[in-house]
Image (spheres, helix red, strand yellow):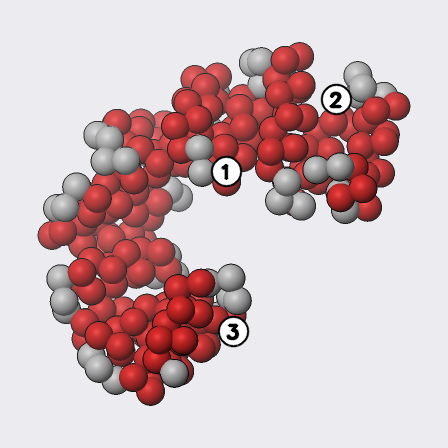
Amino acid sequence: PKEAAYPAPVQELLKKVQAAPEDIRLREELVNSLDTAGLYRDALKQLNLLIAKDSLNHAYWFQQARFSEQLKDTVGAIRYYQYSTRLYPSPSAMLSLANLLAEKKDTAAIVVCRNVNTLFPGREYAADLFFIKGIYHARKGRIKEALIQFDSCIYNNYRYLEAYMEKGFLLSDRQQIRPAMTIFATVLKLDPLYTDAWYWMGKSYEQLGIRDSALEHYQKAFLLDPGLSEAGSAINRLK
C-alpha cells in the first residue's frame, strides 16, 4: 500500500526508519507496528531486512513464521518455525510448529510434542501438548484417541475452549448433535462471547429442525463477528 494508506503511527515510524535505516531497534518497532495493524506482507518485507543483517536471531524467524501463518502460507510457516527452533528451541515456536504439523497429519507433530515434554517437563505445557495430539489424531480420523487427548487437555486446563470445540466438532460430525450441543453450551458458560460456540449451537439447532433457536444463535454469532459470513448466510437462509 502507499504510504498514505498506513495508520499514522506506522507512517511516523516509517519516516524515522528511512532517516536512520541502520537503527535495528527502530526497524523492529516498525515491524511490530505493522503487525499490530495487520499489515503482514509489509511487516515481512521489513523483517527480511532485519534477517539479512542477523540471520541467527531465532526471534526474527519466529516472527517470519507467524506472519506467514497469518498469510495462509502454511508451508512457509512450518519452514520458518523449524529455522527458529534449530537456533533456539523455545516452547512457543515448538508448539506452533507441532500444531501446524498436526493439522497436516504429519507424524512429526508427535515427535515435536515429545521433544517439548523432554525439554520442558511438568504441567506448564501439558494442556497444549494433549490438544496438539488430539488435533493430529482427529485429522487422521482416529476419533476415539482424539477424544481421549482432548479430555486430557481439558483436565489440565478446564478453560481450554479450543479443546471443547474440537470435541464438539467430532461429535457433530458423527451426528451426535445433542452431546455436541452440551459441549458448545459449556463453552458459552465459560465465555459468553465465544463466537464459534454461538454459531455451532445455531448449526446444531438447525440440524435438529428447530429453526427459531437456530436463527437466534446465528444472529448472536453474527452480532459478535459481522465478518462471519457463514452466520450471515445462515440467517438469510432461515429468515
Residue 230 spot, x, y in % from top left: 39, 64
Q: Distance between the residues labelled 1 and 2?
A: 25 Å
Q: Residue at x 75, y 43 (%)?
A: 6
Number of marks in the rendered image: 3
Which element is circle 3 on? Answer: helix
Q: Which residue lies furthest to the right in this view?
A: 19
* Depicted 204 relative to depicted 96: above or below: below
Q: Residue at x 80, y 42 (%)?
A: 4
The answer to which of marks 3 and 1 sits earlier in the sequence is 1
The answer to which of marks 2 and 3 sits earlier in the sequence is 2
Q: Nearer the viewer, residue 166 or 223?
A: 223
Per the image, the residue denoted by label 2 is 24
Q: How far apart are marks 3 and 1 (CA)?
A: 26 Å
Per the image, the residue denoted by label 3 is 223
Residue 151 spot, x, y in % from top left: 23, 56
Snapshot quadrant of residue 165: bottom left
Left or right: residue 122 versus residue 40 is left
What crowding class fits label 3: few (fewer than 14 Cα within 10 Å), some (14-19), or many (20 or more)? some
| Amino acid at pointer 2 | Ile
| Amino acid at pointer 1 | Leu
Which element is circle 2 on? Answer: helix
The answer to which of marks 1 and 2 sits earlier in the sequence is 2
Which element is circle 1 on? Answer: loop
**Res. 191 in view:** no
Snapshot quadrant of residue 81: top left
Marks 2/3 in contact by CB < 8 Å: the verdict is no
Residue 141 spot, x, y in % from top left: 14, 46
Task: Name the mark on residue 209.
Answer: none
